[in-house]
Image (tube, rainbow, N blue to C red):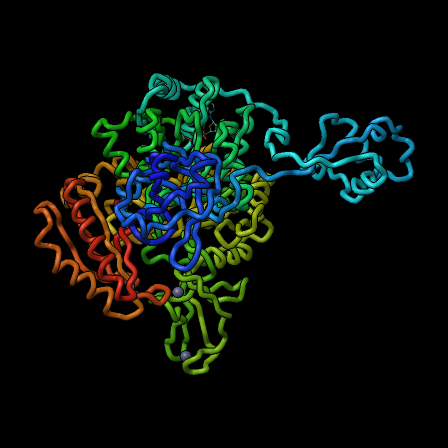
Amino acid sequence: MQEALLTPYPFIKVALPVPMRTLFDYKVPKAIALRHTLKPGMRIKVPFGKSSRLGVIVSLSETSDWDPEQVKPLTSLCDESSVITEELMALCEWAARYYHHPIGDVIFHALPVLLRKGENAEFRTENWWLTTQEGQNLALDQLSRAPRQQDFLKAVQQHPNGLSQHAASVLDLAPAAGKTLEEKGLLRREPRSFNKSGEKHAHQMQVPPTLNPEQTIATEELLDHRSHFNVALLDGVTGSGKTEVFLRVMERLIDEGKQILVMVPEIGLTPQTLKRFEIRFNTDIVLMHSNMSDRERLDAWLLAANGHAKIIIGTRSSAFIPAPNLGLIVIDEEHDTSYKQHEGFRYHARDLAIKRAQSLDIPVLLASATPSYESLTNALQKKFTWLKLRKRAGNAHIPEMERVDLRGKTLIHGFSEYALASIKLCLERKEQVLVFLNRRGYAPTLMCHQCGWIAACDHCDVNLTVHKRANKLHCHHCDTQKALLHTCPECQSEELFTVGEGTEQIETQLHTLFKDTPILRIDRDSTQRKSAMAKLTQKIHEHDQAILIGTQMLAKGHHFPNVTLVIIMDADAGLFSSDFRGMERTAQLITQVAGRAGRAKKPGHVLLQTYHPDHAAIECLCNLGYEHFAIDGLAERKSLSLPPFYHQVIIRAESSNEQEAMQLLAAMRNDLEPYFSKEVYLVGPYAAIIVRKAGQHRALVSIKSPHRGPLHQATQMITQWLEQSTRQHKIRFAIDVDPLETY
Ligand code: ADP
Ligand code: ZN
Ligand code: ZN
């Protein structure tokens, strides 16, 4: 009774990072209720089982569904204000429902790692150097025998408000000299809260180009929609000046005091991209991506949350970044599959961003040269504003696409003679060539000449990739690595040979073919270290002639003005995929890679090496272009009742036992199917294409429906059923709503 007087809400409902689709009730102890105002979005510590957990308050409640005597009190409060704003809490709750994912996991996913671990939501403190009275007055020549101390003192004297530790290291001041000056009583240190604006670099600001007529129309249309919810698809060929268009729109919104979230694909965030923003906006820009430390990410998050950062450039997870004055979300390369999380909480950042913008009543801008079939359909149905840029900006032209028939031809290290001759000519003109092969490593297969043995992964149904330089065999599916073998483990023969080519091999071969030409490889292996990509792009810009060889990493967002020839080694790679999205992906990849050619003044040329030059898809793409290709593809999807016309959910199960996952899904279908709406169609269970991955046998059920409602209901029943039945079995299951992979 007394507790009820203290607060109308003696109970809280808490999200915990556990795989259960439920919230947990706790009591608010009197001592805490007296001193603090609890709010949704605050973190707390609670007892859970035998241990203690960090949780997030989702709501306050007058009652509990449980016996109040049994409900445990929370242990302590971690925040004075909410780390999940009301707006983001609503988004998380929506996402948990839509994706049928445990709410605790969704909410924790929305937080930076350090906050998930209980760190305070505060900026790190950094030491600042200040002069003492004595240090300020000291004549510098008195330190002429200690030049490092002299430099240090001079720098601090010149910064009467203090010099941050970070700035001191940028200026190359010796830390030991600082310490000595401190001991001499000439300098002192003061801890201050980390503040990004203190270290802003001075950039030469760029004068924006005059927009061409297509860009002008698009910009005006976008500005008209800048103060309410609207989704625009900026569909412009590669190099048509899409970025320039959204920079204009951003300029206006920033003048109006808004914050802008720019989402980019996982590997699309190049130093070039950031530079492009920095030379245009004299404002605070923060980055959010996986190459940053947890501390850097928390600082960026805090700067966005307090409204200080005006531009936030981030990958998928930045869809959840708090920004009190958010005025626009830009999703660059919106077709990119890295926007969809492929494990755990399988959300699509683009779809989430659209939902978020709708609640905030702000615009979303999707940009791509190869829009996803989903977005294209929305544009065709007039749900999205469709803005087209069909010409390249400035003086550049769309590159010409030419098919090279490989049938019956002699290949030299995977190249046709025609391709090699074209490379030679291009280099002679002092221009650059880009060779595209979407397969990293030296070779995809290692085989024995005597007995036919093939090196396969012990944990997956796939062959191991040969990495010669690292002297390893590597499974690209589960990351297992072992030393490269030189003797066959079956017959002890030493005649092992590789089959097929990867980028590492092509690089080696090109070195022998073009001895004095700089050859640069860009793939996941060559860019692992933090600044590797920046160094590689720098090298590319330093040389006139060069050959770049790379995987799809090269396809994204790069601007290499001197590339005039693009060679697609294997245009057939995705042609016969068993996934219905195979064609869409192939067309996007080819168009994007081709788009790297001739982006500046010099015209570009693209060679597609193929064994199927007359394949309707290749022909259509080369002659009519992506939009035409996509519209044909959509007609086919419609006739086959496939997404985006039907909505789809995939249920995945995996077990270490060969049969269990399959049996479980069959039992589920058997039990539940009679209760599903007639508009829900099931396929499966069927085995995944790579049945065994990381030791797990994988089975799937696909469900689809022309309507979201019945699909959602069926998914809910399935989720409940699986939660109940997997308690006894050691089977993991996952729900994948709007899947991008269906095998
Ligand atoms: P996209 O984002 O469509 O690939 P970008 O915005 O990167 O295209 O533009 C491609 C190149 O053309 C860039 O170097 C850019 O600076 C330049 N550019 C864009 N718009 C114009 C314009 N109106 N006039 C001249 N150059 C332009
Ligand atoms: Zn052998
Ligand atoms: Zn493996």
| Residue at 28%, 54% in the rendered image | 734
Q: Is residue 255 left or right of residue 571?
A: right
Q: Percent x, y for residue 708?
A: 18, 40
- Quadrant the C terminus occupies: bottom left
| Residue at 54%, 46% in the rendered image | 293
Asked whether 99 or 738 is in front, the reply is 99
Residue 597 in view (yes/no): no
Q: Percent x, y for residue 282?
A: 56, 23
Count of labels in the image: 0
Q: Quadrant of residue 95?
A: top left
| Residue at 53%, 58% in the rendered image | 508
Asked whether 47 or 662 is in front, the reply is 47
Asked whether 25 or 464 is in front, the reply is 25
- Quadrant the N terminus occupies: top left
Residue 156 in view (yes/no): yes
Residue found farthest to the bottom: 491
| Residue at 53%, 52% in the rendered image | 528
Asked whether 66 or 539 is in front, the reply is 66
Q: Is residue 444 left or right of residue 520?
A: left
Residue found farthest to the front: 2
Q: Percent x, y for residue 434?
A: 47, 45
